[in-house]
Image (cartoon, grey):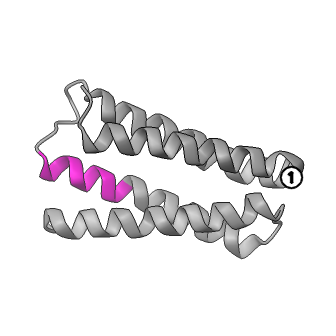
Amino acid sequence: MFSYEFYKIAHLLCLMLFFTTSAILLWYGGRVRSLSIIGGISSILILVTGMGLMARLNISHKEPWPLWINLKMGVWLLLTIGAPVISKRAPKLGKLFYFLGMILFFIVLYAVIYKIE
């Protein structure tokens, strides 16, 4: 098992990688397959490292999750599905979706920092 600090740093690095690749795809209407693959892999790693953090915080997968985790999961799912779809099918909406994603990211960031229940 890895330490809490390892999971936290890995989670943040994967978040940075995901948002960087998504921003490039959304901003420039990307059809770059390698960026989509990197974004998908980083998205899966976000989930894995997030579950590792939950385990280190002794949050059970069998009990209802706190609101801040539900918010993170919802926004993660929306951005993970939405960014590649928007960048490929509706590139004109890419910049709007990018700004929406940033707003949602900051809302979730607030919820995580203050552990909103």
Q: Residue at x 35, y 57 (%)?
A: 48
How far from the left and from the top, in percent, is residue 65?
Answer: 26, 29
View extreme (bottom): residue: 34
Q: Residue at x 59, y 39 (%)?
A: 78
Q: Residue at x 35, y 41 (%)?
A: 110
Q: Secondary structure at mark 1?
A: helix
Q: Quadrant of the image for the N terminus?
A: bottom left
How far from the left and from the top, in percent, is residue 20?
Answer: 59, 67
Q: From the viewer's perspective, is 6 left or right of 87?
A: left
How far from the left and from the top, in percent, is residue 68?
Answer: 32, 34
Q: Residue at x 24, y 38 (%)?
A: 114
Q: Which residue is mark 1?
A: 91
Callout 1: 10 Å neighbours few (<14), some, many (20+)?
many
Q: How many marks?
A: 1
Q: Nearer the viewer, residue 78 or 108?
A: 108
Q: Quadrant of the image for the C terminus?
A: top left
How far from the left and from the top, in percent, is residue 76?
Answer: 50, 44
13 above or below 114?
below
Q: From the viewer's perspective, is 6 left or right of 30?
A: left
Q: Is residue 69 magenta?
A: no
Q: Name which quarter of the figure residue 39 lies in.
A: bottom right
Q: Where does the magenta region start and end?
A: 48-57
45 above or below 95?
below
- Three-letter amino acid code at disc 1? Pro
